[in-house]
Amino acid sequence: MEYNFDCTICGKCCYGQVPLTIKDALTHAERFPLAIIWTPVGPDNKYFNHTARLGPVVNLSKSKEIGVRITPAAYIPPTLPCPELADDNRCKIHLHKPARCKSMPFSPYREESQQADLLIPRENWECDISEEAPVVYRDNKILERQEFDQEFNDLIDQVETLRRYADWLLASVPTLMKELNKVAKKKGGGQVIVSFFSLLPRLPKVDVAEFAAQQLPIVKDFINKSNGVSGGQNYNKHYREYAVELERVLNQ
């Protein structure tokens, strides 16, 4: 079976959270408000094996373990656009945009054989899936795969860093395990949002003060943008708490 797909530059996929590699998160620290998103993936989930390949497996109890998808992210409310989305719906940093954006509509957070439903446009998206659009996926294989492979390789390169980070943070913050357990029990799943600062001790080459100076202006901007917008309350709370952390570093 084959699938047609083409981008129409509708800009609809440029709203809300964007998962990032560690490399992209640091590269774009002055552009996006960052966070670390922990997403529990249970053993019965069809994405469990691939999630376990890309990150840690955590024991919630003696009899239950889960995979955890740990993703640095541009942490943006679903009703707000990417700050690099231009008025004409084009990307202002097209040549240098994150790997996640380059790989769309495919996602290496899934097996290659699990991509078909990603080619079905979400509600109000204007992607072209007509027969006039190019064939991009055939017999569970991505035809033009350079960007997909690059993002996947970047994810593989950071696996050990994320596993060491998870072990360290779970040991340091006991309440995190409780939050993961709570979210894992929810029908439909959910996320646990953690400050990006929690990852920095695992990244010894990062200048923390320089990183904070890059993040603070964009975080303050999103405090204003998210105030009162639909679905923005939890984001606004995170931004405010994160801004305090950033200011503390810069005032040292």
Image (cartoon, grey):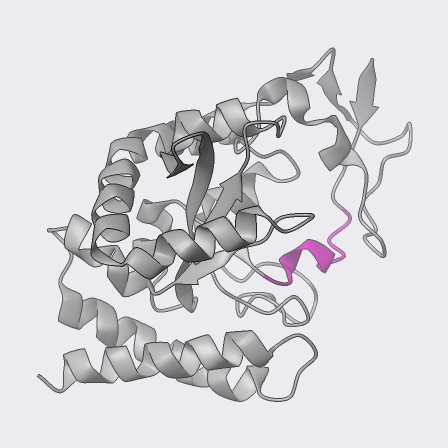
Which residue is at a point 68% across and 71% down the rendered structure image? 79
Residue 13 percent location from the top left of the image: 68, 54
Which of the pair 140/150 is nearer the observer?
140
Which residue is at a point 47% across and 58% down the rendered structure image? 192
Which of the pair 171/88 is nearer the observer?
171
Which residue is at a point 53% across and 62% down the rendered structure image? 92
Residue 55 percent location from the top left of the image: 38, 34
Tell me: 154 left or right of 114. left
Question: Is the C terminus in the top left, top right, bottom left or bottom right quadrant?
Answer: bottom left
Residues drawn in magenta: 8-16
Furthest-left residue in view?
252
- Indicate whether residue 36 is drawn in magenta: no
Furthest-front residue in view?
62
Residue 49 percent location from the top left of the image: 50, 22
- Indicate whether residue 13 is drawn in magenta: yes
Which of the pair 15/90 is nearer the observer?
15
Which residue is at a point 13% across and 62% down the rendered structure image? 207
Residue 209 location, quadrant: bottom left
Residue 197 to residue 181: above or below:
below
Residue 224 percent location from the top left of the image: 52, 89
